[in-house]
Image (cartoon, rainbow, N blue to C red):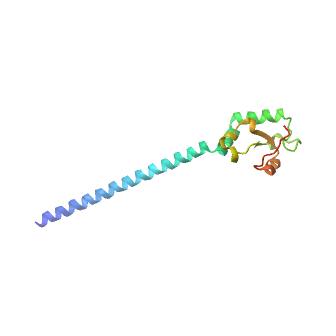
Amino acid sequence: MLGLIDHMSNDSADKENELHRERAILRKKGQDVLENVEAALKKGKTATDPRQQFKNWLRSSEGQAWEKAEFQRRKGICAYCNTLMREADAVVHHVEPIKKLGCNANRVENYRLLHPNCNLSIGTKIVDFLF
């Protein structure tokens, strides 16, 4: 009889250990799934964030080509203060701010090249530009 009780105790301990192992495996899988979901959400947010879309476009060959062509077309003149600027200093300004239009603000017809200080002084205010 004692052997039967010992055997039952060993079976219970083995089952309990197996349940703990399975629980640890499931917990690890759950953490992996959560990390994957968080990474996907972050990637999705970046894809839909208008500021990040704008920054990505500026770094792209298309954005760099537009900036260079626009600088040449405007003969290096700041669209706000109408004075000459260096190409390396020119920044792209949104006429209609991202804050107001979101992704719709990211259109080349909504961009102007300005001095960095002009861009900072305007901020998100809507102003009349010289061209």
Q: State the residue at coordinates (74%, 33%).
A: 65
- The residue depicted at 37 percent of the width and 52 percent of the height is 26
Residue displayed at 25% across by 62% down = 13
Q: Is residue 45 left or right of residue 115?
A: left
In-image side of 62 versus 128 (left or right): left
**Residue found 10% across the figure and 66% down from its top:** 1
Looking at the picture, how far across and down is residue 33, in whole percent? 44, 49
Quadrant of res 4: bottom left
Q: Quadrant of residue 76?
A: top right
Q: Residue furthest left?
A: 1
Q: Position of residue 88 (x, y in %)?
A: 80, 42
- The quadrant of the rendering that contains the C terminus is top right
Q: Is residue 9 left or right of residue 80?
A: left
**Residue farthest toward the right in the current orientation of the protein:** 83
* Residue 81 image position (x, y, % from top left): 87, 44
Q: Nearer the viewer, residue 84 or 105?
A: 105
Task: Please name whichever residue, 128 or 38, is drawn nearer the observer in this view of the structure.
Answer: 128
**Image coordinates for residue 58, horizontal then vertical, percent:** 71, 39
In the displayed structure, would residue 7 be above or below residue 50?
A: below
> On the picture, is 7 further left or further right than 80?
left
Vertical position of residue 58 compared to residue 8: above or below? above
